[in-house]
Image (cartoon, rainbow, N blue to C red):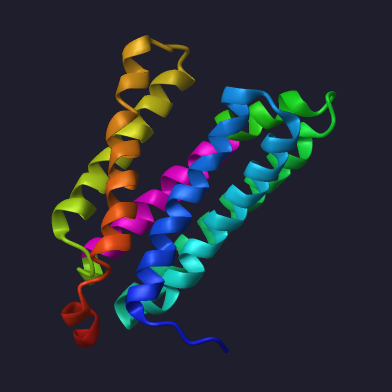
């Protein structure tokens, strides 16, 4: 088994958070090769994050939530990989959009909520990042429910910014600052 330090673990998680956003490239470029590759890599990154964080989050009081987090991210990652494969077949490409807009989003939301609650509970990152993430996730959930009722207003797209900015901030934080080592030693 490969042993990595908590600083390396935090840096890798930060990089994987950024890599997970590469799935957006297909929507922007419509390049099939790039879309397949980035969806698959993004899906694998999404699966890798909870695997790397499992020992950090794993305590008696967080055990169930940690497993729920792992399961939701695993399903989310698999959906992203499937979305990438669907790009290869023009008759299936429309299903990629259905996966992302109608299925994946709920696993992303649940995974994000578990993620930030676990960070809040373990205190391995500053609380303001965890609280920001929880609020941004709840905003994303609200936006998703509003869209479910057929309201797709341009302002709703702006309300996605807190989630995106939080994840970008968290990724950079983890790469530069890492985890709060004193808190990890207590857990």
Residue located at (65% from left, 28% from top):
98
Q: Is residue 169 above or below residue 8?
A: above
What secondary structure predominates along the stretch shown in magenta? Answer: helix
Observer-nearest of 160 and 70: 160
Pinpoint residue 105: horizontal percent, then vertical percent: 51, 37
Q: Quadrant of the C terminus?
A: bottom left
> What stretch of residues is rendered in magenta?
103-120
Q: Quadrant of the N terminus?
A: bottom right
Q: Is residue 59 above or below residue 97?
A: below
Is 175 magenta? The answer is: no
Tell me: 103 left or right of 31: left
Residue located at (57% from left, 32% from top):
25
How many labels, in total?
A: 0
Pinpoint residue 152: horizontal percent, then vertical percent: 43, 12
Pinpoint residue 42: horizontal percent, then vertical percent: 58, 48
Observer-nearest of 2 and 54: 2
Q: Quadrant of residue 36?
A: top right
Q: Is residue 160 visible?
A: yes
Residue located at (20% from left, 52% from top):
129
Residue located at (37% from left, 66% from top):
11
Tell me: 132 left or right of 108: left
Pinpoint residue 125: horizontal percent, then vertical percent: 22, 64
């Amino acid at each position: 088994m490969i042993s990595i330090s908590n600083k390396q673990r935090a840096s890798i998680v930060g990089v994987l958070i950024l890599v997970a956003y590469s799935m957006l490239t297909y929507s922007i470029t419509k390049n099939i090769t790039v879309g397949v590759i980035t969806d698959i890599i993004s899906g694998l990154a999404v699966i890798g994050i909870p695997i790397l964080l499992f020992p950090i989050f794993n305590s008696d009081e967080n055990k169930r939530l940690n497993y729920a987090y792992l399961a939701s991210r695993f399903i989310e990652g698999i959906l992203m990989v499937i979305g990438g494969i669907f790009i290869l077949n023009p008759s299936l490409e429309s299903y990629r959009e259905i996966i992302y807009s109608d299925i994946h989003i709920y696993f992303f939301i649940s995974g994000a909520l578990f993620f930030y609650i676990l960070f809040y509970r373990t205190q391995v990152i500053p609380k303001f990042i965890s609280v920001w993430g929880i609020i941004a996730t709840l905003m994303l959930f609200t936006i998703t429910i509003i869209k479910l009722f057929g309201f797709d207003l341009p302002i709703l797209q702006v309300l996605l910014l807190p989630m995106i900015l939080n994840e970008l901030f968290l990724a950079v934080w983890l790469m530069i600052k890492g985890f709060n080592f004193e808190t990890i030693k207590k857990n």
